[in-house]
Image (tube, rainbow, N blue to C red):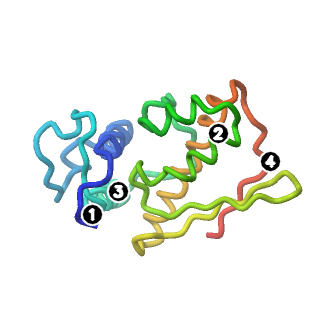
C-alpha cells in the first residue's frame, strides 16, 4: 500500500475532477506529500495510500460521485495498455488484454468478467484494500463510467449496454 506503483496521472485526474467541482488543489491534496511537479511527470508513480487519501479528501469535501460519463475521454489515460487495446484486432482481444494488464493502471480493486450465454457479462469488482463503502462506491462508479466511452472508442460506435446493476 506504501509502494509507488500507481500512475501519478490518476492523482492528476482527481485534482482535475476536484477543480471541476470547485475544489482547489490544496483541498484535494490535503495531508498528501507529493514531490513537486510529480503530477506532470510522465511515468511517475504514487502509492495506493496516497491515492486513497486523495479520494477521501474529495469525498469528504461533499462532492457528488454519481455515475456519469467521463468527458472528454482519452485513450492516453490508459497509457501503453490503452494503445495495446486500440491495436487489438477484435473487441474480445482488447478486453482480454485489459483483463490481463489492468493492474498496470493502479486500480483499488480486483476485476473479473464472467461471460454468460445470453450475451451478457458480469463484471465482478473485489475490494483489494478494505475501503469504506463511500470510497468503494466512488471507485466502482468511476470504473463503470469509463466503460461506455472506452467501448465506443474501440469499436468506432456506441455499443448497446442493456443493463448495469450494482450490489449496493
Q: Quadrant of residue 36?
A: top left
Secondary structure of the residue carrying numbered label 2: helix
If you read the primary sequence from the N terminus, does the residue marked by circle 1 or circle 4 appear first?
A: 1
- How far from the left and from the top, in percent, is residue 55? 35, 56
| Residue 20 falls in image quadrant | top left
- Residue position marked by numbered label 2 in the rendering: 148
Classify 149 as above or below 104: above
Q: Earlier in the sequence, mark 2 or mark 3?
A: 3
**Which residue is denoted by mark 1 in the rendering?**
49
Q: Nearer the viewer, residue 167 or 47?
A: 47
Which residue is found at the position 71% from the left and 54% from the top?
Answer: 164
Between 45 and 132, the one nearer to me in the picture: 45
What's the distance in space between the residues labelled 4 and 3, CA to CA?
Answer: 29 Å
| Sequence-first disc among 2 and 1 | 1
Earlier sequence position, callout 3 versus callout 1? 1
Residue with the most extreme right position: 118
User: Marks 1 and 4: which is nearer the front?
Assistant: 1
Left or right, 34 with respect to 105, comes to left
Circles 2 and 1: CB atoms closer than 8 Å: no
Q: Which residue is mark 4?
A: 162
Badge 3 is on which residue? 55
| SS category of the residue bearing label 1 | helix
Q: Nearer the viewer, residue 35 or 26?
A: 35
In the rendered view of the protein, which quadrant contains the C terminus?
bottom right
Amino acid at each position: 500500500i506504501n509502494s509507488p506503483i500507481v500512475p501519478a496521472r490518476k492523482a492528476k485526474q482527481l485534482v482535475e475532477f476536484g477543480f471541476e467541482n470547485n475544489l482547489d488543489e490544496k483541498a484535494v491534496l490535503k495531508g498528501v506529500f507529493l514531490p513537486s511537479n510529480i503530477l506532470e511527470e510522465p511515468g511517475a508513480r504514487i502509492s495506493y495510500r496516497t491515492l486513497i487519501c486523495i479520494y477521501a479528501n474529495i469525498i469528504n469535501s461533499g462532492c457528488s460521485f454519481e455515475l456519469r460519463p467521463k468527458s472528454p475521454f482519452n485513450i492516453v489515460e490508459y497509457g501503453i495498455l490503452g494503445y495495446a487495446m486500440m491495436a487489438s484486432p477484435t473487441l474480445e482481444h482488447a478486453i482480454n488484454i485489459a483483463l490481463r494488464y489492468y493492474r498496470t493502471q493502479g486500480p483499488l480493486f480486483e476485476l473479473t468478467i464472467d461471460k454468460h450465454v445470453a450475451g451478457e457479462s458480469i463484471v465482478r469488482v473485489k475490494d483489494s484494500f478494505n475501503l469504506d463503502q463511500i470510497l468503494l462506491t466512488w471507485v466502482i462508479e468511476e470504473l463503470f463510467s469509463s466503460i461506455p466511452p472506452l467501448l465506443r472508442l474501440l469499436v468506432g460506435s456506441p455499443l448497446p449496454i442493456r443493463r448495469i446493476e450494482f450490489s449496493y
